[in-house]
Amino acid sequence: MLSSSSSTTSIIPNPSLAMTKSNAELPSKSTNFPHFPDSAQPPFPSPTIHRSQSFATRSFSIGATAPDAAESLECPLVVVSFYKFADFPDHADLRKPLKELCERLRVSGGIILAPEGINGSICGTCDSVEEVLNFIQADERLKGLRCIESPVSPEEEAIHHGHMESSPLAAGEDAPFRWDHVRVKLKKEIVTLGMPSVSPTERVGTYVSPVEWNNLISDPDTVISLLHVYFDSAIVVIDVRNDYETRIGKFKRAVDPCTTAFREFPTWVDDSFKLNEPDDAVGQADSEQTIDEQTEKKMPRVAMYCTGGIRCEKASSFLLSRGFKEVYHLRGGILKYLEEVPKDKSLWEGECFVFDKRVSVEHGLVQGTYKLCYGCKKPVSDADMEAPEWEYGVCCPYCHSSKSEEEKERGRARQRQFERFGIIGGPHKGRKPIKTAQTPESKSNQMSSSI
């Protein structure tokens, strides 16, 4: 994913849809929260890459840097992140044809296939990316991909298009992805929670559009700490991301679980909401309430958000399975919010970490100020890079103490390779060079040069 100085257009063609009712039934008692329509979840139509004029009219010379190069080609790049939960047991069959298509179209990035669906982020020309998305959705089970589109700045397109397959620099350190490289991986889950019984295809929480999100989390009864006592109208805003993501930005009044991996979220929920502790009141024989009624009274309303929405779908499904009755989550995640909500009306504080070479984005999806530590793959600020623990390409203040000297030395060797050849592994990308048959003349020249 790359930055852009202009606002982006969502790949989802109907952003006016606000929110819909979840599979879980909402309480009938009146509240001060915004109205949530009772209509069924709308379908997600097949995505179409939207080309803004500023991007569609640019042209770049393949393999040339001069603006007056003889041959130029109009090929604006775009980065699209997408996912879809589906019953997909034969997911492995898609790996080879999908990888071959991406390589043929020079679409780069990473895609995960699993029995529960597909998740990916790819970069390429508008036409190429659209062809890949249409190919994926040719499977009925994968129709309606949830997508977020980000255009690419002119400078980054120039870097991307300025390298050919024969170049040892590949796409360069600052390009969106290595254009000649796409990874299509097979995994057990497209986002790892470690609980196979949790299925977003069966039930999820209530989607909330970015324009309605502010009203939901601005309610005066919002709980900003789990140490507070819950009351009937309380709502807890939870950041479902990990600690290195929440460190650089989050919504006002949000609770940070401080997890290092998404699979820790279920344990945090059980511990924070005391779901594993017995309730003495439940055991009282003269209680007029059922266990379900008492559990419902204890459970606060929950509003969750993550980067692009995928983790919230699993997290909301998990919370519903644990007895929560009202679970809301931000449609399209933080990225959609930063794209649609003006900065002067935003409740977002800081920057949003993204899993590509932009590292972080701000409002309008403009590239942020953070860089990446290649030792731990976590964001670092300018102040972090002034710390004595910082060593470019090796470690940062957040991972310096946890890395052994052997790990640091491997990082230094990797960095030396990159500085010398432009890619890690040298001109052959870590593979042994292909041996060519030597002619008698070449052998003679080799002997002469050695003498």
Image (cartoon, rainbow, N blue to C red):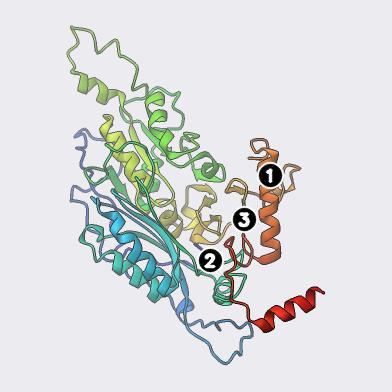
Asked which secondary structure carries label 2, the reply is: loop
The quadrant in which the C terminus is found is bottom right
Q: Is residue 47 visible in this depiction of the protein?
A: no
Query: Could you tell which of marks 3 and 1 lies nearer the N-terminus?
Result: 3
Q: Nearer the viewer, mark 3 or mark 1?
A: 1
Judged from the image, the secondary structure of the residue bearing numbered disc 3 is loop
The location of residue 410, given as percent across then percent down, is 66, 48
* Nearer-the-camera pick, 177 or 228: 177
Mark number for residue 74? none
Q: Residues within 10 Å of mark 1 (few under 14, many from 20)?
A: some
Alpha-carbon distance for marks 1 and 2? 25 Å
Q: Earlier in the sequence, mark 1 or mark 2?
A: 2
From the viewer's perspective, is residue 154 above or below residue 366? below
In the rendered image, which residue does mark 2 sit on?
Answer: 178
Could you give the CA–CA distance between mark 3 and mark 2, rounded to whole angstroms?
A: 22 Å
Q: What residue appears at the point 59 percent right and 71 percent down from the top-left corner?
A: 435
Q: Is residue 205 left or right of residue 374?
A: left
The correct choice, above or below, for 374 with respect to 320 in the image is below
Left or right for 386, reference 217: right
Q: Position of residue 294 (x, y in %)?
A: 24, 20
Q: Secondary structure at mark 1?
A: helix
Q: Which residue is mark 1?
A: 408
**Residue carrying label 3:** 369
Tell me the kind of residue under disc 1: Lys
Q: Earlier in the sequence, mark 3 or mark 2?
A: 2
Residue shown at the point (67%, 35%) measured from the top left: 401
Q: Nearer the viewer, residue 293 or 126?
A: 126
Within 10 angstroms of label 3, few (less than 14), some, or many (20 or more) residues?
A: some
